[in-house]
Amino acid sequence: MPRTATPGTPDGAGLRALDWLNFFVANLQTGFGPFIAVYLTTEKWTQVEIGVALSVGSAVTMLAQVPAGALVDAIRDKRLAAAIGVGLVGVSALLLALRPERLPVMLEEALHGFASCMLVPAIAAMTLNRVGRRAFAERLGRNARFAALGNAAGAAAMGAMGSLVSSRAVFWFAGALAVPALLSVRAMPRRAPPADPDPATATQPPEEPREAGWRVLLDRRLLAFALCIVMFQLANAALLPIAAGEVTRQVGDGANLVIAACLMVPQGVVALLSPWVGRLAERRGRRVALLLGFVQLPVRGVLLAALASPPLIVASQTLDGLGGAALGVLVPLVAADLTRGTGRFNLVVGTIGLAVGVGATLSTAMAGDLAVRFGNRVAFLALALFGAVGLLLTLAAMPETRPEVRPPAPPSPGG
């Protein structure tokens, strides 16, 4: 059985710090995405210009994912990698608040994209190193729960601030949130107790040359999963930004509150479902959990195309929580499945992040162009179609990555 931590142990202190790190990092990241769309719309940016700016961030994220994952693998103390990522996200928020002009916004998107490339694998690696592989799936569910609570709290605070103060104030607040996130990193003990005695589960096993681990990038299961993630993001990434533009046109300055609700509702679902998704993935397999995440995409796209009023847009966002819970658990979990004994966990997390970036870049650019040419309804229906194709692709091509569970050895004749 995996060892559990008690509150009085260094391990317990580390797990509490990990909870708060997930909470505050998500809190900090909430300002990016839909709130940027509202902010830039109030600054007289067009939908195409907003789409281009968001695509710059997605493109930088795409290009930096694999080298950032390799860099995190090379940094012995993962807390340092997490601290660098948090600091860069805070700087990018402050830059956006100071200068909502073309070049500064492009720079902000690039900084934020690179920082996110470091944060995701660093937090996943700290989690794996602290709890071990056998407890990893369920702990990922807890990470996702605290991240969802952080997103919901951040959305509520930023929505109120954007409505009562200004859209610019959202990003001053986001920059300030880097401080408690950095304090959470500092509160984590420097060295985690050995949570998993199996040396094959280590992220950097000493007995294997590191060069051998690069072969994992050619694993057919990784390529299939990456393709599924591209399709997921192609269908998902542009849904809320386009909805944010629609809401802004309908309700003007009240858009920040509506967008906050659009973020809070799915995060509540993520907080409720993520531990269950972790257990489901461990007991029934990763493929089942991935299919659950995909099912909601075509339904959500069609609903957004059909339902134009802000309350109904918020209600349709409940489906987004299912996809968020599935991907939040599965990306690091599948990476851990594919990298047993290779020392390339963060590299594979970065490779999957590259797939996320490819899908998100294509989604925001294509859907933004469709919205301008043919209207938001056509853009939503196109995204729903991409989601349906992704669901069929997962059914046809995604193999199961969960390691075989060996049955217990039969009792000996004498025992």
Image (cartoon, rainbow, N blue to C red):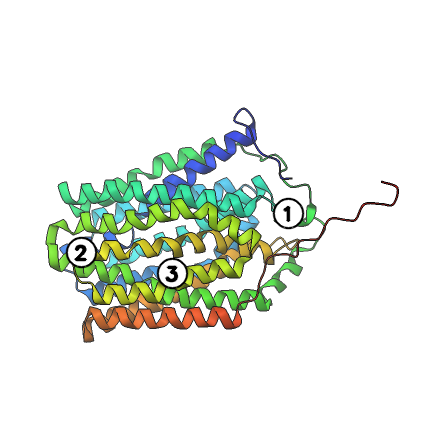
Amino acid type at image mark 3: Val
Q: Contact, CB < 8 Å: mark 2 with mark 1?
A: no
Amino acid type at image mark 1: Ala
Q: Which residue is mark 2?
A: 310
Q: Which residue occupies the foreground of this view, 6 or 355?
A: 6
Q: Which residue is mark 3?
A: 60
Q: Is any part of residue 31 visible from this angle?
A: no
> Upstream in the sequence, badge 2 or badge 3?
3
Query: Residue at the spot x=41%, y=68% of the render?
Result: 231
> Upstream in the sequence, badge 2 or badge 1?
1
Query: Residue at the spot x=62%, y=36% of the render?
Result: 3
Q: Position of residue 301 (x, y in %)?
A: 29, 66
Name the residue furthest bottom.
Answer: 373
Quadrant in which the N terminus is drawn: top right
Q: CA distance from mark 2 to mark 3?
A: 32 Å
Residue 278 vertical placement versus 356 (above, below): above
State which quadrant residue 155 falls in. Answer: top left
- Check disc 1: other Cα within 10 Å, few if <14, some if 14-19, many if 20+: many
Amino acid type at image mark 2: Pro
Asked which secondary structure carries label 1, the reply is loop
> Upstream in the sequence, badge 3 or badge 1?
3
Of labels 2 and 3, the one closer to you: 2
Q: CA distance from mark 3 to mark 1?
A: 30 Å
Q: Which residue is mark 1?
A: 202
State which quadrant residue 22 falls in. Answer: top left
Q: Position of residue 204 (x, y in %)?
A: 63, 49
Of labels 2 and 1, the one closer to you: 2
Query: Residue at the spot x=40%, y=73% of the render?
Result: 389
Q: Which residue occupies the foreground of this view, 302 or 218?
A: 302
Q: Contact, CB < 8 Å: mark 2 with mark 3?
A: no
Q: Is any part of residue 362 visible from this angle?
A: yes
